[in-house]
Amino acid sequence: MKASLLIEKYGFEKISDSSADFEIGSAFVGDLLSWVMGHAKSNDAWITILGHPNIIAVALLRELACVIIAHDAQIQQETIAKANEEDFLILKSPLSAFEISKILISEGV
Amino acid sequence: MRYPLQQWTADGSRVVMIHQHFHVEKEDYANAGRISSQIKQMLKQLGVSSDVLRRIAISCYEAEINMIIHSYGGEVVLTLSNEGKCELRFSDLGPGIDDIEKAMTPGWSTAKASAREFGFGAGMGLPNIKRNCDDFDLTTSPEGTTLVIGFKVL
Ligand SMILES: Nc1ncnc2c1ncn2[C@@H]1O[C@H](COP(=O)(O)OP(=O)(O)OP(=O)(O)O)[C@@H](O)[C@H]1O
Ligand SMILES: [Mg+2]
């Protein structure tokens, strides 16, 4: 599915400036950085409640597709600034990681 | 600019292609991961393959973070030789690791609550490094911890 579909069809909020015009092939859920570092795959969409700028460092090093913040968890301004600098997409939703996963699965991810 | 890796072995003598120092500040969460991304960028420009790059990025990140959250600070030294070996040396100023065997156990962590709030402290850093590098050497004392990891990049 296209990342932009999450915005258009499901009302996810785009909180960094990057384009959402790309395919999401797979996803990873996790809130422990070294777990994500060790187990996520390149191009995964990463569903998390972490909002610290370090998520962008991890996402870039691991070459993840985008970050999806669940539960409308708080995200720091520095995190958004860093994502904008790196042209990296962050989406946000009030849904839980489980509900977001269900959407992704229903769209064929 | 992209350099072909083959050039590294053109001359039989050992020529160090890159030798660079990076400083790591204690509890500098704001810059966590910066050294790893700089190193990844440098190696990418040199044409290191994406699989090796991924393993180096994971290992370097974990070791850099460990210095930030567990140590009093220190430095990272990157050495890339024309023999096609990439070595990363992380040396800090203490307080050292009490029990290396425990530290290497997946899930074991002494990370403080403040670090856990940021998502650190799964106890997976050292095991991640061990799994991703080709050579692993960890020595520690109260004066400091030194981790040397190597990767074949050719
Ligand atoms: N440079 C270091 N100086 C002192 N202690 C360290 C250092 N690196 C690791 N340790 C000790 O080893 C333990 C295990 O490290 P490891 O990287 O595996 O997990 P962690 O850092 O606690 O959590 P995670 O890496 O999953 O965020 C740490 O909790 C800490 O006690
Ligand atoms: Mg660690």
Image (cartoon, coloured by chain):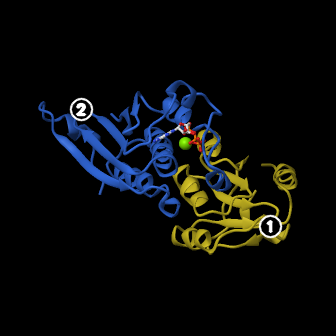
Q: Residue at x 51, y 46 (%)?
A: B70
How packed mark 1 is, by other alpha carbons closer than 10 Å (few <14, some 14-19, many 20 or more), is: some
Q: Is residue B110 left or right of residue B143?
A: right
Q: Position of residue A52 (x, y in %)?
A: 63, 62
How packed mark 2 is, by other alpha carbons closer than 10 Å (few <14, some 14-19, many 20 or more), is: many
Which quarter of the picture shows residue B142?
Answer: top left
Q: Which mark is residue B57?
A: none
**Pointer 1 residue:** A72
Which quarter of the picture shows residue B60?
Answer: top left
Amino acid type at image mark 1: Asp
Of residue B29 and residue B44, the one placed in the foreground of this image is B29
Q: Secondary structure at mark 2?
A: loop
**Image quarter of the N terminus of chain B:** bottom left
Q: Which chain is yellow?
A: A
Q: Is residue B49 left or right of residue B6?
A: right
**Mark 2 against mark 1, which lies toward the viewer?**
1
Q: Is residue B40 above or below residue B107?
A: below
**Pointer 2 residue:** B83
Q: Residue at x 48, y 60 (%)?
A: B28
Amino acid type at image mark 2: Glu
Q: Residue at x 16, y 35 (%)?
A: B10
Q: Secondary structure at mark 1?
A: loop
Residue sticking out furthest to the top? B101
Q: Quadrant of ligand 1?
A: top right
Q: Residue at x 50, y 57 (%)?
A: B27
Q: Colour of chain B?
A: blue
Of residue B54 and residue B26, the one placed in the foreground of this image is B26
CB contact under 8 Å: marks 2 and 1: no
